[in-house]
Amino acid sequence: MRWAIEDGWTLTQRYLAQLARRPARLATVVAFPILMVLIFAYLLGGGMSVPGGGSYREFLMPGMFAMTMAFGLSGTMIAVLDDAAKGVTDRFRSLPMAPSAVLTGRVAADLLNAVLALAVLVGCGYVVGWRPHGSLGETLAALGLLLLLRTALVWAGIYLGLLTSDPSMVTLAQTLEFPFGFLSSAFVATSTMPAWLGTVAEWNPLSSTVTAARVLFGNPGAAGTSWVSAHPVLMAVVWPLVLLAVFVPLSVRRYGRLGN
């Protein structure tokens, strides 16, 4: 276990060093969510209303936090494909190191990256008028649920990156991130959608995390009509755990079979 942790931390540092040497990629990670906040808060927000009343900007920010976490899937795919294309992954497999380190190091580095992006976005939220109204414990719980979703989606990205060698699959994943995000309660209340579409959106795992964050932050727009909307905090834990139960074993198995 100690060997695996040490090797995992070594590769975490490698991935972070790569990110530091590519400031353009780091700037994109931070700048794009801020740009999205400004677009929705100042350009589109004037035409948005929150059922039950309340500030649209306070309604928006938990959705933007969750969307930023969702963007980790394609980012992880890019990193995994890049290492595979350069032969780095094969080199790691030939070294006397813990096999789990390549995967756990990638996850740990991405989570540190996500914490940075989330911190910047929280600061941006304060600038546009968002505030958490819950207790410190509830606020930390909401941030924890957002990072739990990120962890689950990172493992999904690792598996998809190991599964294919075609860079066009990254473009497909990036294209699907936006429908996945918009077909949720991230930007608009599901009650404003047609009934059948609202039900689909409420069962979107992203919606559970968004709604749970709104509940814990004390922001408006947390109400829903379905069972899953009535238990958002529970489902914000269940959905990521289901994804982890699926993609962690698949990723480990796929990594073990590379080159066979």
Image: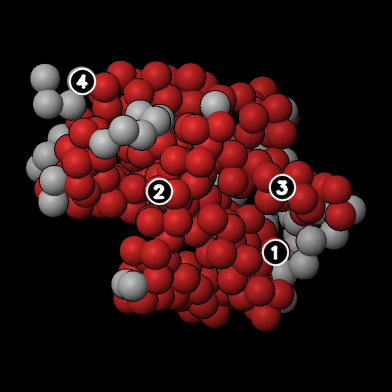
Q: Is residue 73 above or below residue 248?
A: below
Q: Is residue 160 visible?
A: no
Q: Secondary structure at mark 2?
A: helix
Residue located 26% across and 36% down the image: 95
The residue drawn where x is 63% and y is 33% is 236
Q: Secondary structure beneath disc 4?
A: loop
Kind of residue at disc 3: Ala
Q: Which residue is mark 1?
A: 58
Give the distance between the C-alpha atoms of the residues marked 4 and 2, in whole angstroms.
20 Å
Residue depth check, mark 1 versus mark 3: number of the one nearer the observer: 3
Residue 233 x %, y %:
71, 34
Q: Report the amino acid beneath label 2.
A: Leu
Q: Which residue is mark 3?
A: 142
Q: Is residue 140 left or right of residue 255?
A: right
Mark 2 Cα-neighbour bin, 10 Å: few <14, some 14–19, many ≥20? many
Q: Does residue 141 appear to the left or right of 165 in the view shown? A: right
Camera-nearest residue between 127 and 41 = 127
In primary-sequence order, the first of circles 3 and 4 is 3
